[in-house]
Image (cartoon, coloured by chain):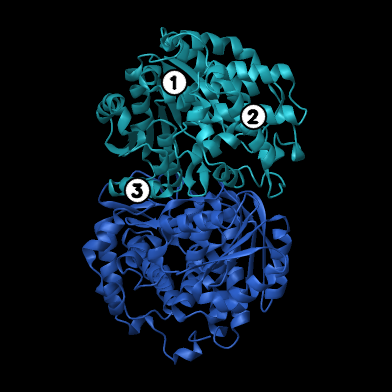
Chain colours: A blue, B cyan
Amino acid sequence: MLRQEVSLDGKDVPYLYGVDVTEELVGALADLAATADLVLLVTDREVAVHAEPVARGLAEAVRVALFTVDAAEQRKTLSLVEDIVEFAVGQGASRSTVVVAMGGGMVGNVAGLAAGLLFRGVRLVHLPTTPIAAFDSVLSVKQAVNLSGGKNLCGTYHVPSLIACDLRWLTSVPRGLMLTGLAEMAKNVLAVVPDRRPALERALGRLADEPAAALLELLAIGCDAKAPYLRTDPRERREALVFEYGHTMGHALEFVSQGGIGHGEAIAWGMLVAAEVSHGLGHLGHDDLALHRQVVGRLRLPPAAAGPGGLDRERIRAVLARDNKRGYLPCAPDEVPMVLLESAGRVVTGDRGLPLVPVPVDLAMSALEAVVGAAPGATLVEAGPARERLGAV
Amino acid sequence: MLRQEVSLDGKDVPYLYGVDVTEELVGALADLAATADLVLLVTDREVAVHAEPVARGLAEAVRVALFTVDAAEQRKTLSLVEDIVEFAVGQGASRSTVVVAMGGGMVGNVAGLAAGLLFRGVRLVHLPTTPIAAFDSVLSVKQAVNLSGGKNLCGTYHVPSLIACDLRWLTSVPRGLMLTGLAEMAKNVLAVVPDRRPALERALGRLADEPAAALLELLAIGCDAKAPYLRTDPRERREALVFEYGHTMGHALEFVSQGGIGHGEAIAWGMLVAAEVSHGLGHLGHDDLALHRQVVGRLRLPPAAAGPGGLDRERIRAVLARDNKRGYLPCAPDEVPMVLLESAGRVVTGDRGLPLVPVPVDLAMSALEAVVGAAPGATLVEAGPARERLGAV
């Protein structure tokens, strides 16, 4: 089992990980919970097979109450958080209770917010079971749920006490979830650590046949990219906004598709749109635009016609107009703040020193049309049978 | 208009107050909101008469959206907070939005939590309109709502940017609300600043005929008592737990009565119970027990038979067993953590240096019986017509 300290909001949080290490992780968790009267284990019903041994092992050391959620994005609401804290109190939770979030980003968020709100904050442990959660979501103190007006508009900051992951859990996720993790790591490579591109390529190449080794490599990209930003900007309100790269159009596509376009696919399209916008504004050169197409191409997205091509453009505009980065900087009603790159690994710095630039919504929409038009499926998809790349691992 | 800086979680927050100063307060608020795209004014329908000029004045400077709540304690839920943040986003709120909480403690709490959660925290202004809110609730970064299992179990910490109060607003509250403010100031005198007892007595004496002067004096007691604790323990988890004095039994009485016993009356009874418990354990001497009866007597509570005397004892026990101070220190299932005094202004220090002592629930319940039995109305009520003390001011 490997151990890495992650600095989150000034606290060093241990991240324990490895392959086939569930028993050791449960031991570490039981140690942490030695002072707890109750562990509230919040899981997604999809991960029951992994949660069962964790719950059983923990129950030998401490009282465990299980709360199972239906991890659909539409259920990521304050009402669900209320259900969780009500359940916890009904089970006799106190300030010494530990909330364990075992699942993907959605479970981490609702359980994380519940832990942040219960008695104004009890201990939180993340056991991520999806690539995106393990590589990205858990490396954050931001906990949030959606409002009907947009994603992640309502939440708080809460530092986990422990993060632990058996990478074996990640190998059984469906392709869409794997793509999300890969897309976020592609984002890290394009926007923050372009020198880690060989590692990304290597991981993508090994994913089908040596998934454990590939996942270890991807986790390292996630930690390397985020660690320095979490130290200097733990609440992700200044320089760490770079991790929103591709997320402006990405969130809009994901939201308007009502989950039809997964997060990974959405931000992959979002990065291409951001690159197109930046190129159009004279920031990003031809080579880096091509690099975007090449890196995103390795992700083997579904054809554009089945994705953003089919969405209602007016609804996309409406969601862009409510983007949650609005308010970081003055922005006209017909503009939306976006993270743009001037080259791989270098952001365009805008007002207030933030990595955000107000972009006319019209320009973002025409960049979307350009991306969709240029990508009728085939041009973005690599040749070769799926299994050889990152099919069912 | 007077101005006092209050240190809240390391930030100096201006508290502006005076009598008949609404216009100046609105000016200060408009200055703060100069960088806001929207002011969300959350009010209680009971204070519409005071809110109208504030909304009108503000609307000359910034866009104002009004959200009116029914300020009943049972409505202090996460669902209401969700309604507020949904409304805010529907009105086009952004990170630059300012939430203004105008009302009593309940409005301050739901709007405060909404401000803490919206975009993970936007600016918050408190305009307290009740004595308890002005003297006590706004001097805190704790924001919370109730769960079905108890009061204030779910919330977060959020620092207001400004607190402002026209004490004129406080003069029109019903007697129950005035009593709450008076009871909390009596608590401050008994538990923290016994040397301010003459000021409390003076304020009680002047309340009917010179309410403005009396309220200024009471506000000063609130600030003086709390300020040093807010500097050293802003999240009120250590020494500032002293302000929970009388609140263990108080919260239980308030909760079980479903609001029939107001907060002020409840904690007044709660202080008498705490004094009885502390006396029974050999901490508090006869003189200080008598002092409790004398100070609480000045508050002119309704007769015990109409208050705690009529409540279901088993339900009180059940609520005590879930008290939200549980978990601060190890506590057996049949014990409840209470703040106890060894003399006026001096707490009994328990485990971990906290001002909390585990008290057998049986002892707390028998102390309640003793207090109820000793107070069949008359013994706690001062002679003299109501108007001369603190009737309708």
- Asked if disc 3 and disc 2 are in contact, CB closer than 8 Å, the reply is no
Q: What residue type is labelled 3?
A: Asp
Residue A295 in the figure: left or right of residue B273 = left
Name the quarter where the N terminus of chain B is drawn: top left
Q: What residue type is labelled 1?
A: Leu
Nearer to me, B147 or A259: B147
Q: Which of marks 3 and 2 is nearer the N terminus?
A: 3
Inspect this view and state whether residue B309 appears.
Answer: yes
Inspect this view and state whether residue B139 appears.
Answer: no
Farthest residue in the right direction?
A: B282
Label annotation for residue B144: none
Same chain assignment for discs 3 and 2: yes
- Asked if disc 3 and disc 1 are in contact, CB closer than 8 Å, the reply is no
Mark 1 falls on what kind of element?
strand
Identify which residue is drawn at 41% across, 48% down.
A350
Residue under label 3, please give it.
Answer: B83
Among the 4 quarters of the image, the one containing residue B12 = top right
Residue B40 in the figure: left or right of residue B73 = left
Farthest residue in the bottom direction?
A: A385
- Asked if disc 1 and disc 2 are in contact, CB closer than 8 Å, the reply is no
Residue under label 1, please give it.
Answer: B16
- Percent of width and height locating residue B227: 59, 24
Among the 4 quarters of the image, the one containing residue B290 = top right
Other residues around mark 2 within 10 Å, as few (<14) / some (14–19) / many (≥20) = some
Q: Is residue B201 above or below residue B114?
A: above
- Percent of width and height locating residue A137: 52, 63
Identify which residue is drawn at 44% across, 9% down.
B385
Mark 3 → mark 2, Cα distance in angstroms: 44 Å
Other residues around mark 3 within 10 Å, as few (<14) / some (14–19) / many (≥20) = some
- Percent of width and height locating residue B386: 43, 12
Mark 2 falls on what kind of element?
helix
Mark 1 → mark 2, Cα distance in angstroms: 43 Å
